[in-house]
Image (cartoon, helix red, strand yellow):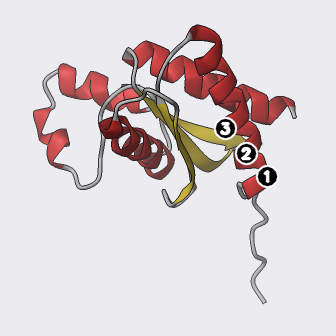
Amino acid sequence: MPTLATKKVLTLAAAKAAMAGAEAEATRNGWRVSIAIVDEGGHPLLIQRLDGASPGSAAIATGKARTAAVFRRATKAMEDSVNGGRFAFVAAPDVVPLEGGLPIVVDGDVVGGIGTSGVTSAQDAMIGQAGIDALLAG
């Protein structure tokens, strides 16, 4: 019988820890954002639209999280590619090539993604990183 791989998965409890860290960072800075966390396949686990966040930010945050998880890299890399002239990339299905989506990597395995929308792209990414840091610290 072939040996099956053992891998980490993002549990709801772990997603809640990441969400708490991201929300704390946004709140500390007074940023009204949406934050989404997805599993490795890009399926939503949690989404929060903080008070005052734009309704449209919820869909963008989810798209950033999904893109980061499925492509297994930060969405900033895709934004940089488009900004560098690779415009065809925007036609890829279900891709949000905007900074602010990060893969959640545990022991070398991508277990999900976190996406934020509502402030500058760099600030969105900072919020997501705070969420990942909270998860890994816990």
Q: Residues within 10 Å of mark 3 (few under 14, many from 20)?
A: many
Does dot 2 land on a helix, a strand or a loop?
helix
Q: Say which mark, if any, is on residue 16.
A: 2
Q: Residue furthest top?
A: 29
For the N terminus, the image quarter is: bottom right
Gap in angstroms between the C-alphas marked 2 and 1? 5 Å
User: In this figure, which residue is indicated by the disc labeled 3?
Assistant: 19
Seen from this angle, which residue lies furthest bottom? Answer: 1
Residue, x 85% and y 29% (percent of image)? 137
Residue 34 at x, y = what percent? 47, 34
Q: Is 108 in front, or is 49? A: 49
Asked whether the beta carbons under mark 3 and mark 2 sit within 8 Å of each other, the answer is yes
- CA gap, disc 3 and disc 1: 10 Å
Q: Are marks 2 and 1 in contact (CB under 8 Å)?
A: yes
128 to 113, vertically: above or below: above
Q: Quadrant of residue 87?
A: top left
Q: Earlier in the sequence, mark 3 or mark 1?
A: 1
Can the viewer see residue 11?
A: no
Read off the residue under disc 1.
Answer: 13
Q: Tell me which residue sits at (29%, 34%) in the image.
A: 97
Identify which residue is drawn at 70% across, 47% down: 15
- Percent x, y for residue 88? 12, 40
Q: Amino acid at mark 2?
A: Lys
Mark 1: amino acid? Ala
- Toward the viewer: 71 or 58? 58
**Quarter of the rendering containing residue 61:** top left
Question: Is label 1 in a helix, a strand or a loop?
Answer: helix
